[in-house]
Amino acid sequence: KQEVTQIPAALSVPEGENLVLNCSFTDSAIYNLQWFRQDPGKGLTSLLLIQSSQREQTSGRLNASLDKSSGRSTLYIAASQPGDSATYLCAVTGHSGGSYIPTFGRGTSLIVHP
Amino acid sequence: DTGVSQDPRHKITKRGQNVTFRCDPISEHNRLYWYRQTLGQGPEFLTYFQNEAQLEKSRLLSDRFSAERPKGSFSTLEIQRTEQGDSAMYLCASSFRDRGTEAFFGQGTRLTVV
């Protein structure tokens, strides 16, 4: 059974810092890994999708990397802003009994203070 | 099409009542997922449809829960005889048929059982 762990669970930083959020997974036989953002009481917004054949994806100030063999992904946020405050979730989609079901970590709660 | 839509956004019900939630996926997406999320946790998988077929159900989905996706379009999730432990955010997601594609989430339905 796939297990996804996110470290740290919470992070508080001053505005302008560069951040690294970590995601690890136990089964490296995955199809893709997706990073999401969730604001309090809201649904999930997709940030980046990395296919299993890819090493990284970039969108604006966000860069996500994937090392499938070691079961790790990192989300790098450059020049953080207060508007980046949210919970960041990673989800791994693997092959589970013929189904393709994203499995989530618990998330990293990020606060960026002015 | 503006994305995955869920209705209602909030539901307060008395213990023992039945509730039903609706999810409208992105129109061309044939895969539909239901998740449950409690405070401080990542989303937990409940069930998954490919077109109208319900292909997998989590052990979290007790016999009080039932989900349908008639004609492979919208989906409903019904909870019978609600319990306080059912209080959570219920999230719906959809994706296109290929296994490596991106999952898109709705805004969720917040259920409170009093």
Image (cartoon, coloured by chain):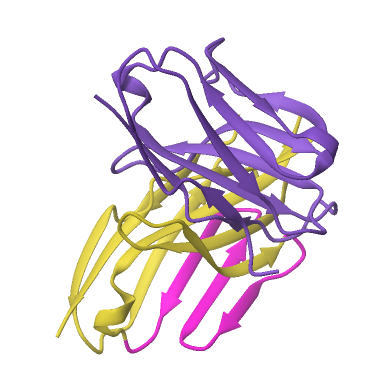
Chain colours: A yellow, B purple
Residue nearest the viewer, comparing A71 with B18: B18
Quarter placement of the C terminus of chain A: bottom left
Residue nearest the viewer, comparing A61 with A83: A83
Answer whether residue B51 is visible to the viewer in this image.
Answer: no
Q: Please, is residue A21 above or below residue B86 in the view?
A: below
The reply, left or right, for residue B7 in relation to residue B4 is left
x then y, percent, for residue A51: 73, 63
Quarter placement of the N terminus of chain A: top right
The reply, left or right, for residue A55 in relation to residue A87 is right
Residue nearest the viewer, comparing B81 with B53: B81
Q: Please, is residue B28 above or below residue B50 in the view?
A: below
x then y, percent, for residue A90: 50, 55
Q: Which of the 4 quarters of the picture holds residue A98? A: top right
Q: What residue lies at 60% left-to-right and 23% top-to-bottom? A: B58
Q: What residue lies at 35% left-to-right and 37% top-to-bottom? A: B38
Q: Which of the 4 quarters of the picture holds residue B104? A: bottom right
Residue nearest the viewer, comparing A15 with B52: B52
The reply, left or right, for residue A69 in relation to residue B20 is right
Is-magenta flag for residue A62? yes
Q: What residue lies at 24% left-to-right and 24% top-to-bottom? A: B114
Q: What residue lies at 24% left-to-right and 57% top-to-bottom? A: A10
Answer whether residue B60 is visible to the viewer in this image.
Answer: yes
Range covered by the magenta-colored residues: A52-79
Is-magenta flag for residue A59? yes
Count of numbered badges drawn on the protein: 0
